[in-house]
Image: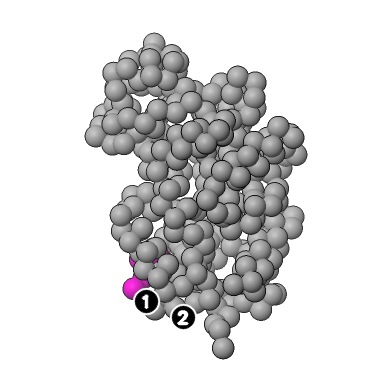
Amino acid sequence: MPSQTLAILVAPGPGPYSDLAREERALVPALSDLGWTVEFVPWTSDMDWSAYRAVLIRETWDYHLNLLEFLSALERIHREAVLWNALDLVRWNADKGYLLDLADRGVRVVPTVISCGVPLAAFQKAASECVVAKPAVGASAYKTFLMEAADPSTVAEATAALAGMRTLIQPFVPSIRTRGETSLIYFDGAFSHAMRKTPGAGDFRVQEELGGASVPVIPSEAELALARRLFSRLPRTPLFARVDLVLWEDEPAVLELELIEPVLFLSQPGAAQRCADVVASRLRTG
């Protein structure tokens, strides 16, 4: 008889229902009501993954610090169990160069340059006097800098921190400070809910741990249309996804597509149940 146990991958550290697993406080009961037992398992664990019916990558917040080891661990899981999101999507999404791929496929993204470190021509490459630079492999605003051509100190700080790293450079999007980012949450390609994320006073980063705030929002038809176009360009439909959009030159553009460990705002009404239903449906259909 197939196992009725699911694994939720987390970073090494505290156990279930700690701050680490705050997103799953709603998801675990929803899965339990559908007959599934859930175990929280660090991605570094050396175990028999075939004991689980499926493995969900959820709160592996440290993956960007240990990418090769992380992908190697996922390869083993992929061989022994069902893995969501799928390994090919995770490999592709782990490096923010995927934004260039999306642009090549006709998806409107914030103009993006990938370089080694912060080149002297960063502002010319981004066609802007104010740019954002961050590692191409990164999460949670890790080593994310706002550089202004008129402020050499910000350029020097970013240059030193990102030296030798594969780096993403984008023009700063002014609407982030006034309007924020719109995050569209999808389960199995179907729109679930949306959040508006805004930075704290004096900052440009929207993460809540850095002072940002998130509130529910109804997305525009233009935002939904852009997300539909994005999903139509992917090789497969992810189990879960978060599409982060901003207004760039008065039209929506993709800032990030999060397929590995996105915050999905599962505490929003009905969100955890919709996610659980999709997991159960995929398991039923194979």
Instruction: Identify which residue is drawn at 66% across, 42% down.
Output: 228
Q: Badges 2 and 1: C-beta atoms under 8 Å apart? A: yes
In magenta, the rendered stretch is 42-47
Give x and y (percent) for residue 32.
65, 75
Position of residue 46 relative to residue 154, above or below, is: below
| Mark 1: few/some/many CA within 10 Å (<14, 14-19, 20+) | few
Res 279 quadrant in image: bottom right
Position of residue 285 relative to residue 166, above or below, is: below
Q: CA distance from mark 2 to mark 1?
A: 9 Å
Residue reaching furthest bottom?
Answer: 1
Res 179 quadrant in image: top right
Left or right relative to 187: residue 71: left
Q: Which residue is mark 2?
A: 51
Label disc, if present, on residue 140 of the rendered structure: none
The quadrant of the picture occupied by the N terminus is bottom right
The residue closer to the viewer here, 197 or 258, is 258
Considering the numbered disc 1 on the image, is that residue within a helix, a strand or a loop?
loop
The quadrant of the picture occupied by the C terminus is bottom right
Q: Amino acid at mark 1?
A: Met
Residue reaching furthest left?
Answer: 164
Left or right relative to 267: residue 236: left
Give x and y (percent) for residue 165.
28, 36
Instruction: Identify which residue is drawn at 65% across, 52% down.
Output: 189
Position of residue 257 relative to residue 239, above or below, is: above
Asked whether the viewer can see residue 102, the reply is: yes
Q: Which residue is mark 1?
A: 47
Left or right relative to 279: residue 138: left
Colour mapping used in the image? one colour
